[in-house]
């Protein structure tokens, strides 16, 4: 496999608008950065099997990519996740990649173990899709060859992606995964994140802001 892991990142300075009722923009940006750090941490665990790239034109995201020794595919248009991945897929094909794996930057519970499971499930030709927990979005898509189907991201991309794969006649594996499956777009998903076990950058940040269960205060013992 000569594959590339693609993580599209739009402008962090105005990220996560749908969390507006929960946080102001400064907090949303910090949360978006924390989630991206979690995704990059997991991605580094498969760096021996895939080349890692952020697809972004954002300077803050590019600085994080450098910190994690992750490549950057420059997204000068910053239009949408769909447009960014279409451009990055063509970039990968021009450089001989036969496989692309696309994950979003807002799945803070993703693990390297889950990514290895996706790679292990990959057919010789076909796709692997990990749906969002509500089975509406597509939170991880492996394609081999790299453009076997076009990707169209949005609230309801999972079923259209499955339908597109069926039309190719090639194998499709659908894997349910608790970490990859949770993307953070709406305030109620913050509650789900905080209820889950874990100590990710995003979870620590939210707890530092006083959200979710707090650790019990240390009790003093008599000397």
Image: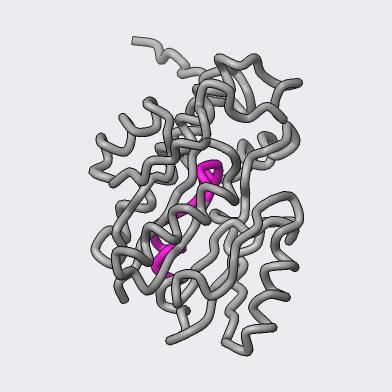
Q: Which residues are magenta?
A: 104-117
Image quadrant containing the C terminus? top left
Look at the image and name its color scheme.
Answer: one colour
Residue 129, picture quadrant: bottom right
Asked whether residue 47 appears in the rendered view, the answer is: yes
Q: Is residue 78 above or below residue 207?
A: below
Residue at image point 62% right, 74% down: 174
- Decide if residue 8 is on the left or right side of residue 136: left
Q: Nearer the viewer, residue 53 or 193?
A: 53
Provide residue 61's location: percent of width, then percent of height.
Answer: 39, 32
Residue with the most extreme bottom position: 169
Q: Is residue 105 left or right of residue 192?
A: left
Residue drawn at the location 33% of the way across and 69% of the way down: 97
Placement of 191 over or under 44, stated as above or below: above
Q: Position of residue 138 (x, y in %)?
A: 64, 59
Within the magenta stretch, is there residue 108? yes
Q: Residue at x 59, y 58 (%)?
A: 178
Note whether 175 is above or below 168 in the view shown. above
Quadrant containing the N terminus is bottom left
Viewer-proximal residue among 104 and 204: 104
* Percent coordinates x, y for residue 199 in the rendering: 46, 38
Q: Is residue 31 left or right of residue 145?
A: right
Q: Is residue 216 visible?
A: no
* x, y percent for residue 110: 49, 52
**54 is within the stretch colored magenta:** no
Total label count? 0
Q: Please give the name of the residue rendered at 66% of the width and 18% of the height, measured from the top-left corner.
A: 23
Q: Is residue 199 above or below residue 83?
A: above
Which residue appears farthest toward the top when viewing the image? 223
């Amino acid at each position: 496999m000569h594959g590339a892991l693609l993580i599209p990142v739009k402008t962090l300075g105005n990220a996560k608008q749908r969390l507006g009722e929960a946080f102001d923009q400064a907090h949303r940006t910090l949360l978006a950065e924390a989630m991206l750090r979690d995704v990059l941490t997991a991605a580094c665990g498969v760096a021996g099997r895939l080349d890692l790239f952020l697809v972004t034109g954002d300077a803050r995201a590019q600085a994080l990519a450098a910190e994690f020794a992750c490549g950057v595919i420059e997204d000068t248009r910053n239009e949408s996740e769909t447009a960014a991945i279409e451009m990055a897929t063509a970039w990968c094909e021009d450089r001989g990649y036969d496989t692309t794996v696309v994950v979003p930057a807002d799945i803070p519970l993703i693990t390297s173990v889950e990514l290895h499971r996706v790679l292990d499930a990959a057919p010789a030709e076909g796709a692997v899709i990990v749906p969002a927990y509500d089975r509406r979005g597509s939170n991880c898509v492996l394609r081999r060859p790299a453009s076997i189907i076009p990707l169209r991201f949005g609230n309801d991309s999972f079923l259209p992606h499955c339908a597109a794969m069926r039309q190719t006649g090639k194998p499709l594996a659908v894997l349910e995964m608790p970490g990859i499956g949770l993307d953070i777009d709406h305030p109620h998903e913050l509650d789900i994140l905080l209820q889950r076990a874990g100590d990710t950058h995003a979870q620590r940040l939210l707890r530092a802001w006083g959200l979710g269960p707090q650790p019990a205060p240390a009790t003093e013992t008599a000397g």
